[in-house]
Image (cartoon, rainbow, N blue to C red):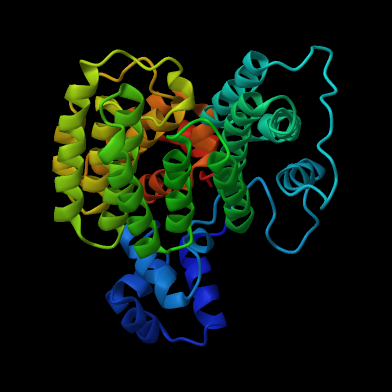
Amino acid sequence: MAEHLGDRIARLRRLAYLTQEGLAERSGISADVVRKLEQRRKHSARLPTLHALAKGLGVELTSLLGDPPGVPSNGDAEPPQLVAVRRAIMPPLFAPPAEPTGPEKLSMSLLRREIAEGWTLYHDAEFGRLMETLPGIIADARFAAAVGNADQRAAGQVALGKALQLGGHLAIRLGKTDLALSSLERAMAAAGESSDPLLAPMISNSVAWAYQRQNRLDDAQNLAVYAADGVEREHVGSAEGMRVWGGLLMSAATSYARSGDYDQASGMMLAAEEATERLAKMPPPVDGKMLSIFNRSSVRIERVRLAVQHARPAEALNLARGMRLSRDTPPSWRTWLLLDVARAYTDVGDAGGAVKALERLRRVAPAWMRHHTLAVAIVTDLWNGPARPPGLRKLAEFLGVAN
């Protein structure tokens, strides 16, 4: 079973030679919060609190989140699938790009389809399958970026940038933020040689997320704002540009919120939501799967999340009430929404409402539910609460929480 958040904080605090009071002072939070977490009287904490604790402990945010469980970070040998991903992202120096080995001749349409299928696996939380297929995708894209005339190579660089961006996202989910940044830096280099002016700002959004996971909130915020300003100056007249700009604006808002500035974050999210109305009137992008996820649904999902994380559960539930998700909302985003709704119901004392949201999550995205430490935290809180509503035991057993 995964290490409890309180046990993890206590272990890291002792390694830093800090008392509970010393950690509280460094983090700018109450010593009572530290005590309750370490004594397991609290089973979860909000992201601003976790960022503050990580800063006080001098560790990455991922050290406190404790996710995901799939790849060991305890000194054991990495699984062969991850070694293959690492080698694909960082191939041997001076080695020529390997030729495609598949039965079909490599074409840009086939390569784009491979990358789109890889992103689908990612959004479905099929990380094991993605680790198996991603090395081949990156190898194909690297070959496409090295052969042909100038236009063909520039198109290949687009594919390589997207493949390496996918590698960065996978590495973040596997808790390997240094590998993620290596992949994203190579993706950014490919973007500079590509024929797509929006690729670099899209990758900037991914880099900002990696910075957030490393508790580098100022760096994440500054990068997202800088990239968004560049897109706004030149590209918001198209649906493609609007989606990339909106994704960067949401990223910047998230960094502000995690730094404790909810008002600034809320204002930026309202601006993003207004932009989705303009986006809805534009011709749709040619290949939306290869762009940032930005629409009215994604903005509202993020607004719900920010409200929950800043102890505004009633506001979160009001934002979520009656929400109709667009058809292209991936399972990963649906997961965040249902988890945040469950957290909000828990915070207002409606355990039954929380269980219903979690039951729905188990139906629509069981793989993501198993992956998210927040799901375990919510179910643990409910399991240790004063009443156990119908359906809670099955959820607790599904996540390994039940005694």
Residue 150, percent across and down? 64, 29
Residue lying furthest front: 150
Q: Is residue 53 above or below residue 13?
A: above
From the viewer's perspective, is 218 left or right of 164? left
Viewer-closest of 102 and 387: 102
In the figure, 222 relative to 158: above or below? below
Q: Is residue 308 left or right of residue 358?
A: left
- Res 45 seen here: no
383 left or right of 259 in image: right
Indicate the quadrant where residue 221 lies: bottom left
Res 243 quadrant in image: top left
Which residue does the image show at 55% across and 51% down from the upper left? 67
Answer above or below: position of 195 versus 232.
above
Q: Residue at x 29, y 75 (%)?
A: 32
**How many marks overall?**
0
Evaluate whether residue 312 shows in this view. Answer: yes
Image coordinates of residue 40 in percent, x first then y, are: 42, 64
Instruction: Classify 36 as above or below 378.
Output: below
Q: Position of residue 368 (x, y in %)?
A: 51, 33
**In terms of depth relative to the viewer, which is nearer, 276 or 365?**
276
Q: Residue at x 32, y 44 (%)?
A: 230
